[in-house]
Amino acid sequence: MKAFDLHRMALDKVPLEFLGEVALRSFYTFVLVFLFLKITGRRGVRQMSLFEVLIILTLGSAAGDVAFYDDVPMLPVLVVFITLAALYRLIMWLMSHSEKLEDLLEGKPVVIVNQGELAWNKMREASLTEFEFFMELRLSGVEQLGQVRLSIMETNGQISVYFYPDEEVKSGLCILPGECYPRFTTVPEAGEYACVRCSHILSMQAGEHQLCPRCANPEWSKASRAIRVT
Ligand SMILES: [Zn+2]
Protein backbone atom coordinates (compact mmCIF):
# COMPACT_ATOMS: atom_id res chain seq x y z
CA MET A 1 0.00 0.00 0.00
CA LYS A 2 1.20 3.50 -0.82
CA ALA A 3 0.58 6.27 1.70
CA PHE A 4 -1.09 9.48 0.49
CA ASP A 5 -2.25 7.75 -2.69
CA LEU A 6 -4.92 10.25 -3.79
CA HIS A 7 -6.96 7.76 -5.80
CA ARG A 8 -7.09 5.31 -2.90
CA MET A 9 -7.97 8.11 -0.47
CA ALA A 10 -10.76 9.45 -2.70
CA LEU A 11 -12.42 6.29 -4.06
CA ASP A 12 -10.35 3.22 -3.12
CA LYS A 13 -12.01 0.26 -4.86
CA VAL A 14 -15.42 1.76 -5.60
CA PRO A 15 -16.23 3.09 -9.09
CA LEU A 16 -17.01 6.78 -9.64
CA GLU A 17 -20.74 5.98 -10.19
CA PHE A 18 -20.91 4.80 -6.58
CA LEU A 19 -21.05 8.48 -5.56
CA GLY A 20 -24.52 8.57 -7.13
CA GLU A 21 -25.52 5.59 -5.02
CA VAL A 22 -24.21 7.39 -1.92
CA ALA A 23 -26.54 10.29 -2.76
CA LEU A 24 -29.47 7.86 -2.99
CA ARG A 25 -28.45 6.08 0.24
CA SER A 26 -28.14 9.43 2.05
CA PHE A 27 -31.59 10.47 0.84
CA TYR A 28 -32.96 7.15 2.10
CA THR A 29 -31.46 7.54 5.60
CA PHE A 30 -32.55 11.18 5.71
CA VAL A 31 -36.14 10.15 5.04
CA LEU A 32 -35.92 7.41 7.69
CA VAL A 33 -34.54 9.73 10.38
CA PHE A 34 -37.08 12.39 9.45
CA LEU A 35 -39.95 9.89 9.73
CA PHE A 36 -38.59 8.61 13.03
CA LEU A 37 -38.51 12.11 14.51
CA LYS A 38 -42.03 12.74 13.19
CA ILE A 39 -43.36 9.50 14.69
CA THR A 40 -41.80 10.16 18.08
CA GLY A 41 -43.03 13.74 18.06
CA ARG A 42 -39.85 15.49 19.22
CA ARG A 43 -39.61 19.13 18.31
CA GLY A 44 -36.05 19.96 19.32
CA VAL A 45 -32.81 18.77 20.83
CA ARG A 46 -33.18 21.00 23.87
CA GLN A 47 -36.10 18.98 25.22
CA MET A 48 -34.49 15.59 24.79
CA SER A 49 -33.86 13.42 27.81
CA LEU A 50 -30.84 11.18 28.22
CA PHE A 51 -32.91 8.22 27.10
CA GLU A 52 -33.89 9.94 23.88
CA VAL A 53 -30.35 11.00 23.14
CA LEU A 54 -29.38 7.34 23.47
CA ILE A 55 -32.00 6.29 20.92
CA ILE A 56 -30.91 9.04 18.52
CA LEU A 57 -27.25 7.99 18.80
CA THR A 58 -28.10 4.37 18.01
CA LEU A 59 -30.16 5.55 15.10
CA GLY A 60 -27.46 7.89 13.83
CA SER A 61 -24.87 5.17 13.90
CA ALA A 62 -27.07 2.78 11.90
CA ALA A 63 -27.98 5.52 9.44
CA GLY A 64 -24.37 6.63 9.00
CA ASP A 65 -23.20 3.15 8.03
CA VAL A 66 -25.86 2.63 5.41
CA ALA A 67 -25.26 6.04 3.83
CA PHE A 68 -21.79 5.36 2.43
CA TYR A 69 -20.69 1.74 2.89
CA ASP A 70 -21.20 -0.16 -0.36
CA ASP A 71 -21.46 -3.52 1.44
CA VAL A 72 -24.13 -2.44 3.96
CA PRO A 73 -27.57 -3.38 2.58
CA MET A 74 -30.41 -0.90 2.97
CA LEU A 75 -33.32 -3.01 4.25
CA PRO A 76 -31.84 -4.09 7.61
CA VAL A 77 -31.54 -0.47 8.69
CA LEU A 78 -35.25 -0.07 8.01
CA VAL A 79 -35.84 -2.90 10.49
CA VAL A 80 -33.54 -1.14 12.99
CA PHE A 81 -35.64 2.01 12.66
CA ILE A 82 -38.98 0.24 12.98
CA THR A 83 -37.73 -1.68 16.03
CA LEU A 84 -36.38 1.46 17.71
CA ALA A 85 -39.57 3.40 16.98
CA ALA A 86 -41.70 0.58 18.41
CA LEU A 87 -39.42 0.29 21.45
CA TYR A 88 -39.56 4.03 21.96
CA ARG A 89 -43.35 4.10 21.86
CA LEU A 90 -43.55 1.10 24.20
CA ILE A 91 -41.19 2.63 26.77
CA MET A 92 -42.98 5.98 26.57
CA TRP A 93 -46.24 4.14 27.29
CA LEU A 94 -44.68 2.19 30.18
CA MET A 95 -43.23 5.41 31.62
CA SER A 96 -46.61 7.07 31.61
CA HIS A 97 -47.81 4.19 33.79
CA SER A 98 -44.84 3.87 36.13
CA GLU A 99 -43.23 6.78 37.92
CA LYS A 100 -40.34 4.56 39.04
CA LEU A 101 -39.43 3.65 35.47
CA GLU A 102 -39.73 7.29 34.46
CA ASP A 103 -37.29 8.36 37.19
CA LEU A 104 -34.92 5.60 36.18
CA LEU A 105 -34.83 6.51 32.49
CA GLU A 106 -35.44 10.24 32.49
CA GLY A 107 -33.91 11.18 35.84
CA LYS A 108 -35.47 13.49 38.40
CA PRO A 109 -35.33 17.27 38.59
CA VAL A 110 -32.63 18.24 41.14
CA VAL A 111 -32.74 21.31 43.37
CA ILE A 112 -29.34 22.99 42.95
CA VAL A 113 -29.84 26.32 44.73
CA ASN A 114 -32.08 26.72 47.74
CA GLN A 115 -32.48 30.06 49.59
CA GLY A 116 -29.34 31.58 48.16
CA GLU A 117 -26.97 28.66 48.74
CA LEU A 118 -26.01 25.61 46.70
CA ALA A 119 -27.99 22.54 47.77
CA TRP A 120 -24.70 20.82 48.53
CA ASN A 121 -25.90 17.36 49.60
CA LYS A 122 -28.41 16.93 46.80
CA MET A 123 -25.82 18.00 44.28
CA ARG A 124 -23.40 15.40 45.47
CA GLU A 125 -26.07 12.70 45.26
CA ALA A 126 -26.74 13.73 41.68
CA SER A 127 -22.97 13.89 40.99
CA LEU A 128 -23.10 17.41 39.62
CA THR A 129 -20.27 19.87 39.81
CA GLU A 130 -21.04 23.52 40.36
CA PHE A 131 -19.18 24.72 37.27
CA GLU A 132 -21.57 22.92 34.96
CA PHE A 133 -24.44 25.13 35.95
CA PHE A 134 -22.77 28.40 36.98
CA MET A 135 -22.68 29.18 33.28
CA GLU A 136 -26.38 28.38 32.93
CA LEU A 137 -27.16 30.56 35.95
CA ARG A 138 -25.15 33.44 34.45
CA LEU A 139 -27.11 33.04 31.22
CA SER A 140 -30.24 33.50 33.36
CA GLY A 141 -28.77 36.80 34.62
CA VAL A 142 -27.55 35.59 38.03
CA GLU A 143 -24.46 37.38 39.38
CA GLN A 144 -24.39 35.93 42.89
CA LEU A 145 -26.31 33.03 44.44
CA GLY A 146 -28.01 35.21 47.10
CA GLN A 147 -30.30 36.48 44.32
CA VAL A 148 -31.73 33.00 43.82
CA ARG A 149 -34.58 31.68 45.97
CA LEU A 150 -34.73 28.37 44.14
CA SER A 151 -33.04 26.82 41.13
CA ILE A 152 -33.80 23.41 39.69
CA MET A 153 -31.93 21.35 37.12
CA GLU A 154 -34.60 19.80 34.93
CA THR A 155 -34.32 16.31 33.44
CA ASN A 156 -33.30 17.70 30.05
CA GLY A 157 -30.37 19.58 31.60
CA GLN A 158 -31.96 23.04 31.46
CA ILE A 159 -32.09 25.14 34.60
CA SER A 160 -35.14 26.84 36.10
CA VAL A 161 -34.40 29.90 38.25
CA TYR A 162 -36.74 31.61 40.75
CA PHE A 163 -35.46 34.93 42.07
CA TYR A 164 -35.81 36.86 45.30
CA PRO A 165 -37.28 40.35 44.94
CA ASP A 166 -34.51 42.99 45.26
CA GLU A 167 -35.28 43.86 48.90
CA GLU A 168 -34.91 40.20 49.96
CA VAL A 169 -31.65 39.45 48.09
CA LYS A 170 -29.09 37.89 50.44
CA SER A 171 -25.30 37.84 50.51
CA GLY A 172 -24.06 35.07 48.28
CA LEU A 173 -21.24 33.49 46.35
CA CYS A 174 -20.32 35.51 43.27
CA ILE A 175 -20.45 33.21 40.24
CA LEU A 176 -18.72 35.49 37.75
CA PRO A 177 -15.61 33.87 36.24
CA GLY A 178 -12.90 33.35 38.89
CA GLU A 179 -10.32 35.99 38.10
CA CYS A 180 -12.55 38.91 39.12
CA TYR A 181 -12.99 37.49 42.62
CA PRO A 182 -9.89 36.78 44.74
CA ARG A 183 -9.92 33.71 46.98
CA PHE A 184 -8.57 33.72 50.52
CA THR A 185 -7.68 31.11 53.08
CA THR A 186 -6.85 33.86 55.60
CA VAL A 187 -9.40 36.65 55.19
CA PRO A 188 -8.03 40.21 54.93
CA GLU A 189 -10.84 42.12 56.68
CA ALA A 190 -13.98 41.58 58.76
CA GLY A 191 -17.12 40.76 56.82
CA GLU A 192 -19.21 38.07 55.19
CA TYR A 193 -17.43 35.44 53.12
CA ALA A 194 -18.74 32.70 50.84
CA CYS A 195 -17.23 29.22 50.64
CA VAL A 196 -16.05 28.88 47.03
CA ARG A 197 -16.99 25.21 46.98
CA CYS A 198 -20.46 24.93 48.55
CA SER A 199 -21.36 28.69 48.73
CA HIS A 200 -22.01 28.61 52.51
CA ILE A 201 -21.91 32.14 53.99
CA LEU A 202 -19.90 32.89 57.14
CA SER A 203 -19.03 36.12 59.00
CA MET A 204 -15.33 36.30 59.80
CA GLN A 205 -12.92 38.71 61.48
CA ALA A 206 -9.76 40.04 59.83
CA GLY A 207 -6.96 37.45 59.84
CA GLU A 208 -9.27 34.48 60.51
CA HIS A 209 -8.80 31.24 58.64
CA GLN A 210 -11.50 28.59 58.95
CA LEU A 211 -12.61 25.41 57.26
CA CYS A 212 -16.14 25.63 55.88
CA PRO A 213 -18.48 24.06 58.47
CA ARG A 214 -20.54 22.51 55.68
CA CYS A 215 -17.96 21.09 53.23
CA ALA A 216 -14.58 21.53 55.02
CA ASN A 217 -13.12 23.61 52.17
CA PRO A 218 -10.56 26.24 53.32
CA GLU A 219 -11.08 28.78 50.50
CA TRP A 220 -13.33 31.82 50.74
CA SER A 221 -14.25 34.74 48.56
CA LYS A 222 -15.95 37.94 49.64
CA ALA A 223 -19.73 37.52 49.69
CA SER A 224 -21.46 39.66 47.09
CA ARG A 225 -24.56 41.72 47.87
CA ALA A 226 -25.24 42.64 44.26
CA ILE A 227 -28.91 42.88 43.35
CA ARG A 228 -30.29 42.24 39.90
CA VAL A 229 -30.43 45.21 37.59
CA THR A 230 -33.17 44.59 35.07
ZN1 LIG B 1 -18.30 24.95 51.92
Image (spheres, rainbow, N blue to C red):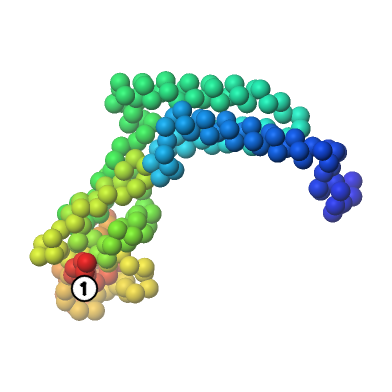
Q: Is residue 193 left or right of residue 60?
A: left
SS of the residue under disc 1: loop
Q: Which residue is mark 1?
A: 208
Image-based side of 153 in relation to 115, left or right: right
Q: Position of residue 225 (x, y in %)?
A: 18, 70
Q: Please indicate, yes or no, whether residue 75 appears anywhere in the rendered image.
A: yes
Q: Is residue 106 above or below residue 81?
A: below
* Towards the viewer: 188 or 70: 70
Q: Residue at position x 30%, y 46% from top?
A: 153
Occupied quadrant, residue 175: bottom left
Q: At x 13% / y 60%, what residue is drawn? A: 165
In this view, the residue in front, 219 or 32, is 32
Specify the quadrant of the image occupied by residue 188: bottom left
Decide which of 116, 123 is in the foreground and name it: 116
Residue 91, placed above or below residue 209: above
Give 33 or 197, whichever is nearer the viewer: 33
The location of residue 110, given as percent across then percent down, is: 28, 43
Is any part of residue 216 visible from this angle?
no
* Callout 1: CB less than 8 Å from ligand 1: no
Q: Where 106 falls versus 85 (above or below)?
A: below
Please state if 40 lies on the left or on the right of 223 as rendered.
right
Q: Quadrant of the C terminus?
A: bottom left
Residue at figure coordinates x 31%, y 43% from the top left: 154
Q: Quadrant of residue 209?
A: bottom left
Amino acid type shown at disc 1? Glu
Task: Please report the residue visible at 30 percent of the width from the left and 37 percent of the height from the top.
Answer: 108
- Residue pushed farthest right? 1
